[in-house]
Image (spheres, rainbow, N blue to C red):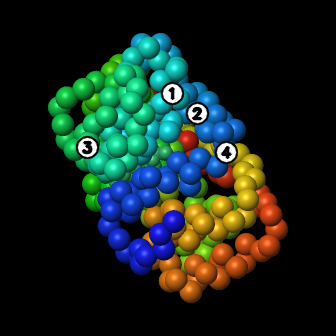
């Protein structure tokens, strides 16, 4: 795992770099992936014949599993070519190199469900309203947009400055819900939790690799301190928390 200087690297380069080991970083365990897939299918109200667009799909970890819940192919969109290169060669997954901004501005495609799992924060604040508005226009009648985001408080260990940055973030589940309501959609929000247990060394490697963009700006010395504070215990446990925001037309 490389530990080159990664402070301040652009978002697409960050994801191109992380793509080969993204699944190792983010898919804590098979149980976690199964749990998240079931929560996504629930909030997306996936069913046979429902067309899904996964915006910022990454390596398609969830799209591939969500494909079992619908008879329609899933459009997997991401601006990172390296992420799309990780997509499984599965005829049920249609890769599309595009950002949320491009999809929202385009005139092509109608979907019953649009998922943005931990990707909307990469859209500039000044553009999020227009992006959600544009995506809302691409929904079929009875369609819904589902956002999955980190809440403003996380229980997982991380450097103090990253925790503070998250607390002070202007883009929160509440502000996202407001933007969706302003796009004329009916919004429901909830939080889902999963208890993660993993080897401490594996979590240390994730922090070292700045696996969250939230870790981009953290000084090397602070990063090393946070890793030392993880302690010597073989396993580490924490509650992983996610905000789910559903907006229906
Ligand atoms: C934290 S990853 C989440 C990947 C996937 N949704 C998941 O949960 O496994 C964020 C993804 O958003 C993508 N991304 C970055 N900027 C984006 C943009 N402007 N529009 C759409 N996706 C973007 C990245 O390339 C990356 O694949």
The answer to whether mark 2 and mark 4 are in CB contact below 8 A is no
Mark 1–mark 3 distance (CA, rounded to whole Å): 20 Å
Find numbered disc 4 in the image and state the secondary structure of the residue it sits on. loop
Residue 135 in the figure: left or right of residue 193:
left
Sequence-first disc among 3 and 2: 2
Q: Which residue is drawn at 32% across and 59% down?
A: 12
Residue 233 in the figure: left or right of residue 73:
right
Find numbered disc 2 in the image and state the secondary structure of the residue it sits on. helix
| Figure quadrant of residue 18 | bottom left
Q: Which residue is drawn at 50% across and 83% down?
A: 219
Q: Residue at x 42, y 53 (%)?
A: 19
Can you identify the residue that label 1 sits on?
Answer: 66
The answer to whether mark 4 and mark 3 are in CB contact below 8 A is no
Q: Is mark 3 within 8 Å of ligand 1?
A: yes
Q: Which residue is drawn at 35% across and 43% down?
A: 85
Image: 84 above or below 48: below
Q: Position of residue 3 (x, y in %)?
A: 48, 74
Can you identify the residue that label 3 sits on?
Answer: 98
Image: 233 above or below 56: below
Find numbered disc 3 in the image and state the secondary structure of the residue it sits on. loop
Sequence-first disc among 4 and 1: 4
Sequence-first disc among 2 and 4: 4
Sequence-first disc among 4 and 3: 4
Image: 226 above or below 184: below
Can you identify the residue that label 4 sits on?
Answer: 29
Neighbor class of circle 1 (other Cα within 10 Å; few <14, some 14-19, many 20+) is many
Mark 4–mark 3 distance (CA, rounded to whole Å): 29 Å
Can you identify the residue that label 2 sits on?
Answer: 37
Sequence-first disc among 2 and 1: 2
Q: What quarter of the picture does the C terminus occupy?
A: top left
């Amino acid at each position: 795992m490389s530990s080159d200087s990664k402070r301040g690297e652009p978002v697409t380069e960050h994801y191109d770099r992380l793509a080969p080991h993204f699944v190792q970083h983010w898919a804590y365990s098979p149980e976690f992936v199964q749990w998240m897939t079931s929560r996504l299918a629930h909030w997306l109200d996936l069913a046979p014949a429902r067309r899904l667009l996964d915006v910022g799909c990454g390596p398609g970890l969830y799209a591939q599993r969500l494909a079992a819940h619908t008879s329609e192919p899933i459009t997997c969109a991401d601006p990172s070519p390296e992420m799309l290169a990780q997509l499984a060669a599965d005829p049920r997954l249609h890769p599309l190199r595009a950002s949320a901004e491009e999809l929202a501005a385009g005139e092509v495609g109608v979907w019953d469900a649009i998922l943005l799992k931990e990707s909307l924060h990469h859209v500039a604040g000044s553009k999020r309203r227009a992006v959600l508005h544009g995506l809302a226009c691409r929904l079929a009648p009875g369609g819904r947009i589902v956002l999955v985001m980190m809440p403003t408080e996380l229980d997982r260990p991380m450097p103090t400055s990253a925790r503070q940055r998250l607390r002070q973030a202007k883009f929160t589940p509440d502000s996202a819900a407001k933007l969706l309501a302003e796009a004329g959609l009916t919004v429901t929000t909830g939080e889902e939790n999963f208890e993660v247990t993993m080897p401490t060394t594996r979590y240390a490697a994730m922090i070292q690799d700045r696996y969250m963009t939230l870790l981009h700006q953290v000084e090397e010395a602070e990063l090393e301190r946070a890793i030392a504070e993880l302690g010597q215990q073989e396993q580490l446990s924490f509650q992983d928390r996610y905000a789910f925001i559903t907006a229906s037309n």
